Image: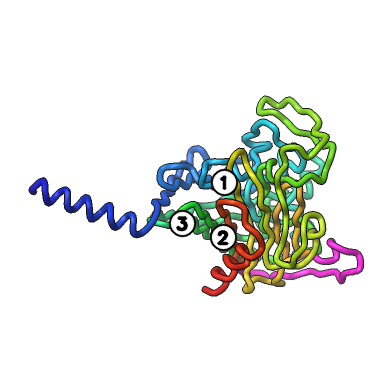
Amino acid sequence: MSKLFTLTCLFLLATTFLANGQSVVLIPREMETRVDVEIDGKLFTSFRWDEKIKRPVLLPIMTSGGAFLTRGFPIETRDNEAVGHPHQVGASFSYGDVNGIDFWNTSIFRSEKELERMGRIVLRKIIDTKSGNGKGELETSSAWTHPNGKVLVLETTKFIFHAKGKLRLIDRITTLTANEEDVVFGDNKEGLFAIHLNSALQQNNQFPLKITSAAGVTTDRKSGEGLTGQYFNSEGLAAEKIWGTEGKWAAVTGTIGREDVTVAVFDSPSNHNYPSNMMVRPYGLLALNPFGQKAFGADRAERKFTLRSRQNMTFRHRLLILPGKAGAKEIEREFGKWTAR
């Protein structure tokens, strides 16, 4: 084989790669209870299912510039992180009332008595991983498990990780199947598709609050200095006014270190009870809840949903990570692109 021919082949391969986009590579590390997702050789996120977390999560999630988008506490705590809500880890999918069992608040910080009514979402299998140019895929199966060991719900989830320049997208397609008996999703504020963000993306609304160092030394934060988050949603609401209202998407824009970033969670028109109620808090939480209603206001009707034995339902959500600071017009444009498919 001639040197010229070899160089030509390498040039064509490089040209094809550039045309197709960045490499998204999934690396299973099952002995470490994780699957790493790398973009052009750099960590984007890890799918994790270790016992300390009580449910499969994406943790950490990184920006295109290499900043931690998610809060690390309490699994991989970093300096200056708020210590409240230790059950809210990374990006996850869980709910606070499934046949009376709480899958949202469970954590290693709960007492034995509290854990008697708290379930676990247990990974059963990594079904498939696919690496590629511009996107990668991960498919998993899990079991929503009662404290007594009985499986209430079977879950199959496909993640699609997209890289487009500095834009990052995570699509989550989740199918829930009632196992041997009917399953009732009660009216509860805790859930469903959620991400707990870096403390820098908090808004200055809860003081004093406890913060920790990586070494575990806690102090009080008494002002909003260093907090940059500005929360808004599809209905034109901001900050605390978003909580419990219906909307297509919710977002926060701010700065982590020297990097400006905007994050949004999207609800699909195909989802149950679209548009979802918004479990959004300016302390760093973006969450979409299709089941709770009266939990968000005493004047609202109670709402329950029964999933019959062996029947299933599917949810589609998107996590959008935009470089720079963006507003409602930019988020609505991205939402429109997604829903037009």
User: Tag 2, which secondary structure?
Assistant: strand
Q: Residues within 10 Å of mark 3 (few under 14, many from 20)?
A: some
Query: Is the residue 244 above or below the residue 108 in the image?
Result: below
Marks 1/2: CA–CA distance: 14 Å
Q: Which mark is residue 164?
A: 3
Query: Is the residue 227 above or below the residue 324 in the image?
Result: above
Q: Residue at x 72, y 41 (%)?
A: 227
Q: Which residue is mark 1?
A: 61
Instruction: Name the residue type under label 2.
Output: Arg
Q: Is residue 150 visible?
A: no
Nearer the viewer's eye, disc 2 or disc 3?
3
User: Tag 3, which secondary structure?
Assistant: strand
First along the sequence among labels 1 and 3: 1
First along the sequence among labels 1 and 2: 1
Instruction: Name the residue type under label 1.
Output: Ile
Q: Which residues are magenta?
A: 293-314
Q: Is residue 71 rendered to the left or right of residue 30?
A: right
Instruction: Name the residue type under label 3.
Output: Lys
Q: Which residue is mark 2?
A: 172
Q: Residue at x 82, y 59 (%)?
A: 241
First along the sequence among labels 2 and 3: 3
Marks 1/3: CA–CA distance: 16 Å
Is 296 within the magenta?
yes
> Residue 234 location, x and y as percent?
70, 66
